[in-house]
Amino acid sequence: MGRETDVRTGFDEDERTRVGGLYWEAFQRKLKPAFADDRTGEEFVTAAMRPDRVITARLVGAVIGVCGVHHEGRGAFDPAWPATRKRLGPWSGARALLALSLLEHRAEEGVLVLDGICVSPSHRGRGIGSRLMDAVDAYASRHGLHTVELSVVDTNPRAEALYRRLGFEPVDTGALGLLSGLYGFAAYTTLRRRIGGGRAA
């Protein structure tokens, strides 16, 4: 790219809005059923983002890519009930947590689950996604995990093609059935890649 891209775990508090905005822009179609409107959803997700579960890519000090990970029961954003109730109210908060719970994917032992990866539109096609995936492998290794897992929806074939090029192999599929219209996709494929090469467990 001509300039060095800094990829590491975490973000500063003054980067929260940018990180949350990128994440919401990329995944709003499946997240917004949990919220009354887009503004509420973006503000909620931004406030709940966890620096210790987010890997960020920066160029000239600006965040251009974000990858969330789900580890030890916590993901990229943590919609805990007390904070959710305070921000959204009891009824809207309960609805939000129910809608989000349907998207939750629990990891098996030894497996790191990706909570979404996104790159700023103006920086796509420059290897940022691959750099983020390298950092994901490093994160998994530091925590003694042997496999990285992610799910890709049927409306994003380009992402699935990228993951396959990066060595991910399909291990499962699933369908939303009657909920497909609500979340904006009908089916998903789960893919895995073993750290250090070899077939996924």
Image (cartoon, helix red, strand yellow):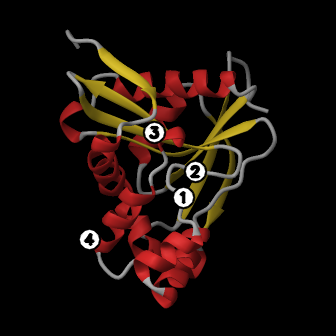
Q: Is residue 186 above or below residue 27?
A: below
Q: Where is mark 1, residue-wise?
A: 78
Q: In front: mark 3 or mark 2?
A: 2
Residue 147, x across and y down, in percent: 71, 31
Q: Earlier in the sequence, mark 4 or mark 1?
A: 4
The amino acid beneath tag 1 is Asp
Q: Is residue 129 above or below residue 33?
A: above
The amino acid beneath tag 3 is Cys
Q: Earlier in the sequence, mark 1 or mark 3?
A: 3
Residue 29's image quarter? bottom left
Q: In front: mark 4 or mark 3?
A: 4
C-alpha separation, residue under disc 2 versus residue under disc 1: 6 Å
Q: Where is mark 4, residue-wise?
A: 39
- The front one of 28 and 74 is 74
The amino acid beneath tag 2 is Gly
Q: In front: mark 4 or mark 1?
A: 1
- Determine the residue positioned at 68% across, 17% down: 197
- Residue furthest toward the bottom? 91
Q: Is residue 75 above or below residue 144?
A: below
Q: Residues within 10 Å of mark 1 (few under 14, many from 20)?
A: some
- Determine the residue positioned at 21% across, 12% down: 3
Q: Are marks 1 and 3 in contact (CB under 8 Å)?
A: no
C-alpha separation, residue under disc 4 versus residue under disc 3: 22 Å
Q: State the SS at label 2.
A: loop
Q: State the SS at label 4.
A: helix
Residue 121, x across and y down, in percent: 22, 40
Q: Are marks 2 and 1 in contact (CB under 8 Å)?
A: yes
Residue 117 appears left or right of 193 = left
Q: Where is mark 2, residue-wise?
A: 75
Quadrant (top left/top right/bottom left/bottom right) for the C terminus: top right
Q: Where is mark 3, residue-wise?
A: 67
Residue 43, x across and y down, in percent: 32, 65
